[in-house]
Amino acid sequence: MARFVLIGMLLCTVSGCNLLGSDGPAEVRILIDGADGQQLRLVTTTNFLAQRQPVFSDEGIYLQDTTLVRVLDADTIVVNTPYDELYDIAIAQRFLARVLIGSPRSGLRVRAWVDGENRLDRAASADSVVQFLYYYLNSDIPLDEPTEV
């Protein structure tokens, strides 16, 4: 009996099945709508470092979190609206997109989906940057720190 359990575990490991939870996301879809033919710069990468940092008021009161991002390598392209593209993130499990809007644009809208779930839907204005940052965390480490040691 133990031999069959061992063989089953070995086959499951080799085949890549995940007994402990679901697999991470496979793709990100970026859609940029606007008047046909508007040119924008789009920066995309899966090679970056991200760190959450708390933001405090002058009195030391916690206000919110912000994320510091350091891009290590990226692709920058000029795209025309409408733009609709799928990006494979199955291995990297992270994705960063920045839409750089230089001159006034009307009706520009940037949307992003992760495995079909909408994560960003934003109207863009002139001289702005619309950023989409996604990273998948799969950890058994508790998020709350213990109150007593």
Image: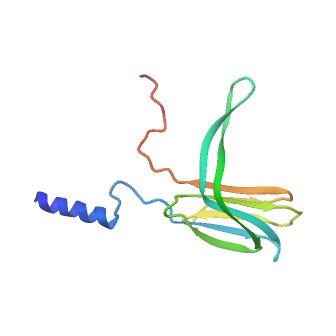
**In the displayed image of the protein, which residue is found farthest to the bottom?**
36
Left or right for 143, reference 48: left
Colour pattern of the rendering? rainbow
Q: Where on the picture, by quarter, is residue 82?
A: bottom right
Q: Where on the picture, by quarter, is residue 106?
A: bottom right
- The residue at the point 82 percent across, 76 percent down is 37
- The residue at the point 82 percent across, 56 percent down is 128
- The residue at the point 88 percent across, 63 percent down is 103
In the image, residue 95 lies at what x, y percent? 60, 59
**In the displayed image of the protein, which residue is found farthest to the front?**
72
In the image, residue 24 lies at what x, y percent? 47, 59
Name the quarter where the C terminus is drawn.
top left
- How many dots with numbers? 0
**In the displayed image of the protein, which residue is found farthest to the right?**
104
Left or right for 103, reference 134: right
In the image, residue 124 lies at what x, y percent? 80, 60
24 lies above or below 83: above
Name the quarter where the N terminus is drawn.
bottom left
- The residue at the point 64 percent across, 72 percent down is 85
Q: Where on the picture, by quarter, is residue 53?
A: top right
In the image, residue 65 lies at what x, y percent? 65, 39
Q: Which residue is more in the foreground, 42 or 58?
A: 42
Q: Which residue is more in the foreground, 58 or 47?
A: 47
Q: Which residue is more in the foreground, 29 or 45?
A: 45
